[in-house]
Image: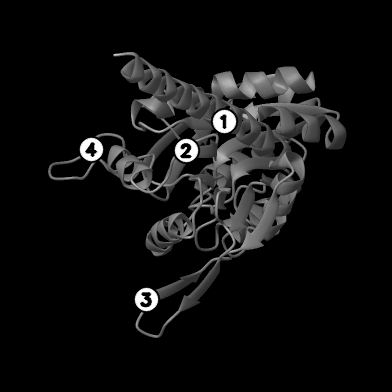
Amino acid sequence: MKPVVLAFPGMEPLAAEIAQEVGADRAAVGLHRFPDGETLVTLPPDLQGRSVALLATLRDPDPLVLPLRFAAETAREFGASRVGLIAPYLGYMRQDRRFGPGQAVSAPLFARFLQESFDWLVTVDPHLHRISALHEIFDIPTRRVASATQIAAWIAHNVPDAIVLGPDGESQQWVAEVAGLADRPCEVLSKVRSGDRTVDVSVPDSRTFLDGTPVILDDIASSGRTMVTAIERLRQIGTRPPVCVIIHAIFAGDAFADIRKAGAARIVTTDSIPHESNAIHLGPGIGHALRELEEVLDLTNAGMLQARGNETESGKDT
C-alpha cells in the first residue's frame, strides 16, 4: 500500500516533490482556527494500514505542536501503520543547556514531546551546538538531511566566480564542504554576538574577497543582523554586492527587507521554510532519507515478526 505525505498549510509544494521522489500519495492537513484560539484538525480518513508522513516546518512551533499531536493521534485512529514527522526546520534545538538560573533546557524536552506522537523524524541541518547528533536526544529513528550538495550545485550554476564565506568559526567545516563541492575558494569571517539583535562581524585582510562574488552562507537568518553586518563590512572594503545563501529562512520581523537594504545582490534560501526567496529544493534529499528510513523500519518490523513466530513455534514444541 502506498505511503502518504500529509502536508500542513504552506508545505504543499514540498510535499509534491517528496511524494514524487518516494512514489507516495499526498494530501493536505486541514486546520481551522476558532476565535478562541483552538484548532480543529482534519485528515483524509482513508489511512488504514498506510505509512503516514506528516510534513510541517517548525519555524513558529508553539501554534503548531498541538495540531501536530492531534494529527498524529488521529492518523493512528484511522488505522495508520506508523506515523512519522518530516520537519525540514526543527525548532527548539538551540536551547541545549541552561544559560541562566531557572531556565528550561528546551531541546531534550521538545524531543521527548515529539517522540510521544511520532515513530520517526526526518529534518534538514538541525541547528545543533553542544548536541552532536539527533540520537543523543531522540529515542526514535531519525535522519538528518544535509543541504550542502544542493547548495553547492546552486552556487556552481548561478555564481561561477563565487568566493564562499562563512559567518563565523563554527561554520568553517560546513562552508569548506560546500566550497569544495562547488570547486570554489572559501574564507571564514569572525562574529561576536552580544545580544539577540547585536552582532559584530570582522573580515580577514585578504584580496580574495575582491577577486570574485562573495557568497555568504548561513544556516539560519532570524534577526538578519549577521547577514546585514557582514554585507556592510564587505562593501566597506570594496567587494561586489554579495549573494546571501541561507538554509532556514526564519526572517523574523523586517529581517528579509533589512538584508536587501544592506546591499545584497540576491537572497536565496532552501524550501525548508516557505518564503519568496526559496530557490534550492530539498525534496530529493528528504525523499532519499525517507526511503532509507522506511526500508530500515520495514526490516526491523519483519525481524520482530519473525522473532515472534519463532517464539510461538518454540512454545508449541514444549
Q: Position of residue 121 (x, y in %)?
A: 48, 39
Q: Are marks 2 and 4 in contact (CB under 8 Å)?
A: no
Of the pair 45 and 108, the residue shown nearer to us: 45
Of the pair 57 and 129, the residue shown nearer to us: 57
Q: Is residue 207 visible?
A: no
Dot 3 corresponds to which residue?
Answer: 38
Q: Residues within 10 Å of mark 1 (few under 14, many from 20)?
A: some
C-alpha span from label 2 to label 1: 8 Å
Q: Secondary structure at mark 1?
A: helix
Dot 4 corresponds to which residue?
Answer: 99
Residue mark closest to the camera, 3 vs 2: 2
Q: Secondary structure at mark 3?
A: loop
Q: Are marks 2 and 1 in contact (CB under 8 Å)?
A: yes
Q: Position of residue 225 (x, y in %)?
A: 51, 48
Instruction: Give the mark nearer the N terminus: 1 vs 3.
Output: 3
Q: Secondary structure at mark 4?
A: loop
Residue mark closest to the camera, 4 vs 1: 1
- Label 3 amino acid? Glu
Dot 2 corresponds to which residue?
Answer: 120
Q: Which mark is residue 293?
A: 1
- Label 4 amino acid? Phe
C-alpha span from label 2 to label 4: 30 Å
Q: Position of residue 30 (x, y in %)?
A: 55, 70
C-alpha span from label 1 to label 3: 33 Å
Residue mark closest to the camera, 4 vs 3: 3
